Image (cartoon, rainbow, N blue to C red):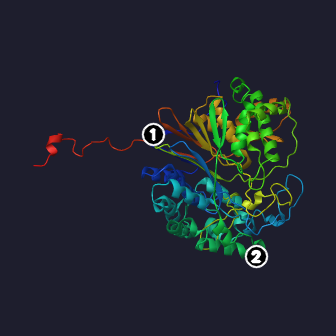
Amino acid sequence: MSQLPFSCEKTPALGSGGMVVTNHPLGTAAGYEILAAGGTAVDAAVGAMLALCVVEPMMVGIAGGGLAHIRLSDGTHTVIDGLAHAAASTTPDIYDPVSDTPPNHMETRNRRSALGASAVAVPGNLAAWCEMHDRWGKLPFADVIEPAIRLAERGFIVTPYLEGAITEGAEDLALDRAISDLFLPGGAPCPAGSRLVQGDFAQSLRLIAQEGAAALHGGALGAAMAERIATGGDDAGWVTQDDLARYKTRERSVIHGTYRSFDIIGPPPPASSGVHIAQMLNLLEPHDVARLGFGSADGLHLLAEVLRIGFEDRRAASGDPDFIDVPVEKLISKAYAEQSQSRLRDVAAPTPVRGGYESHDTTHITVADGEGNVVSATHTINGLFGARFVVPGTGIIPNNYMMNFDPHPGRALSVAPGKRVPTSMAPMMILKNGALRWALGLPGGLRIFPSAFQTIVNLIDHGMTLQQAIEAPRIWTEGHDLEIEKPLEPQADALRARGHSVRVMPHVGGGMNAIARHPDGTMEGAACWRADGTVAALGGGRARPGVRFWPDRAPEDTKPG
C-alpha cells in the first residue's frame, strides 16, 4: 500500500473481554459498565443507547426509530426494525408541498412535516430496545437503564458538539417552552462546560425501568405524548395513544452478499444499505481497485460511478416492502452487476436528481462481548432535536420522521398509514470463512451507506488498518455534484476533467465506529474524527481457577485443625 494522503487523528483500543464504541464518551462508559457487570453485548448496546438519549438528545431518543443488526454467539444474524411509521389516520394529502420539482420538492408549507406535533411519526426505538433486552439480555433491565437514569438525574457536562447543535437549532427550540427551558436557559444555549440536568426525563426513565416499553406504548408516557400531539394547535399531528399501543417491531432477515471471498451482511428493506452495498461491491469486484490505489483520480472516478448507479437503482426501487416490491435478489446478483458494467462511464455527466430526504442527525453504536455476540445499531429522532419540542412533564423529545415522506400523493414515498420510509442506515458486518472480521456503522443520512461501502473497500482492497479505514477521506454523489473531503482536494482538477462537478467538503457523512475481531480472538475498537466517538475495551478477566486468597501459605496450611 502506497503512502496514504491522510493521517489518523484517533487511536484504537484492544481487548479480549468485550468492546464498546459509541459517538459519546458517556454512552461508551455506560455500555462498558454493563459489560463489566457481566451483561451481554445486547445488554450493553441497549444501555448505551438509553444513555445516548440523555447525552446526545439532539440525535436519538426513546421516541425515535432505528435498526439493530445482531450477530449471536452461534453465528446467526437478525435485524430488529424499530423504524418509525406513519400514524393510522394519515393520508397522502395531509401536507401542502411547496414545490413539485427539486431541490425543495420534499418541503411543506409552514414546515409542518419537519417541525412540531404534525411532524411526528409513530416511534419504535424503545420498543426495539426492550424487545432486544427481553430476548438476548442477561442483566435485569433496571441495571441496564440505570446509567441513563443517573446521567439524567445528576446531569453531565455539555460538550462543544452539543452546544453547537443547540446553537444551530436555537431559533426553533425557542418556540417551545419545555424544550427551551432545557437547552436555552435564560434565552442562550447551554454553554460547553456547563452541567445539563434532565429531571423530568430521569423520572420517565424510572417509569420505563418498572414498566418497560409499555410506559410509552400504552402507558402514562404515551398518553402524555398523544395529548401534546393532539393539542398542538396549528401544528397538531396524527399520532394517538392507540397508535403507540399498537406499534410492533419487525424482525427481518439479513441481506447476504460476497466480495473477494468475504461475506457482506447488512439489513434488508426498508433499509437501502444491505441491498445497495452488496450491489455496489459486485459492480466493483471485476476491477483491480488495489492497483488503482487509494485516492487516485481513476479510483475516485470509478467509486463515483458505482455510487451513481447504486443511487439510480435505489430511486427506481426502494421502500417499505409492505408497500413496494423491491427486487432484492436481482439487485444483489452477480449477473445483474455484470449487466450493469456497461453503465459505468469514462466521463461523468452530472444531472439533477429527485432524491429523497434523510437527516444527517443520527447516532451509531458497535458493541461486542467476550462470548461472540455483536451488535451494530443505528438509531435516531431524525432531524436535529427531532420535532424540536418536549412533551411537558416527561423530558421526551419526539421524532420528526414525517419529513422523510414525499408530500405529493401518488408517489413511492407518499404518506400512507403504517408505512416506513427507506433509510440509509448501515449497521454492517463482514465475515471471512464464517467468522466475524468487522462490524461497523455511522450516522449521516444519505451519505451513510456510501461511506460504509467505501470503508469496506478500504479494509479489503487497500489493506488499511481499522482506524485508517474509518478515518480515510470519503466521497459522495447521487449523480449530480461530487462531494470530496479536504484531503482529496489535490485530485479535484483531475476529477473535473473527467466531467465531475466537484465540491470540497469539510466532511462527508458522520462519525463511524467499528470493531474488528482478529484471528487470535482479540478485538479492536475504533472511532473516527467526525464525532465524539470513544472506544472502551474490556481486558483482563476473572482470576485463574484455584487461586487462593492467602498466597503466602502452602495449601496444607489451610486445612482445618
Q: Quadrant of residue 386?
A: bottom right
Q: Earlier in the sequence, mark 2 or mark 1?
A: 1
The residue tagged 1 is: 16
Query: Viewer-nearest of labels 2 and 1?
Result: 1
Question: Residue 98: x, y in percent?
Answer: 87, 61
Label 2 neighbour load within 10 Å: few <14, some 14-19, many 20+: few
Q: Residue furthest right?
A: 100
Determine the residue positioned at 71% across, 49% down.
269
Q: Depth check: 466 or 486 in front?
A: 466
**Secondary structure of the residue carrying numbered label 1:** loop
Q: Describe the element under mark 2 as helix, strand or loop.
A: helix
Image: 463 above or below 69: above
Residue 17 is situated, as x and y percent measured from the top left of the image, at 44, 43
Q: Is residue 76 above or below residue 163?
A: above
Q: For this view, does 550 lie left or right of residue 367?
A: left
* Residue under label 2: 233
Please tell me which residue is depicted at 65% across the width and 24% down the height of the picture: 2
User: Which residue of the protein is positioned furthest toward the left in this rendering?
Assistant: 561
Identify which residue is drawn at 68% across, 53% down: 361
Compared with 64, 31 (above or below) is above
- Whether residue 469 is visible: yes
Type of amino acid at the residue the image marks with label 1 = Ser
x and y percentages locating residue 389 in the rendered image: 68, 67
Where residue 284 appears, x then y in whole percent?
Answer: 73, 31
Could you classify mark 1 by the number of other residues whose Cα lies within 10 Å: few (under 14), some (14-19), or many (20 or more)?
many
Check the picture and name the quadrant holding the N terminus: top right
Identify residue type, mark 2.
Gly
Q: Please tell me which residue lies in front, 156 or 400.
A: 400
Residue 59 visible to the viewer: no
> Residue 246 versus residue 201: which sits nearer the camera?
246
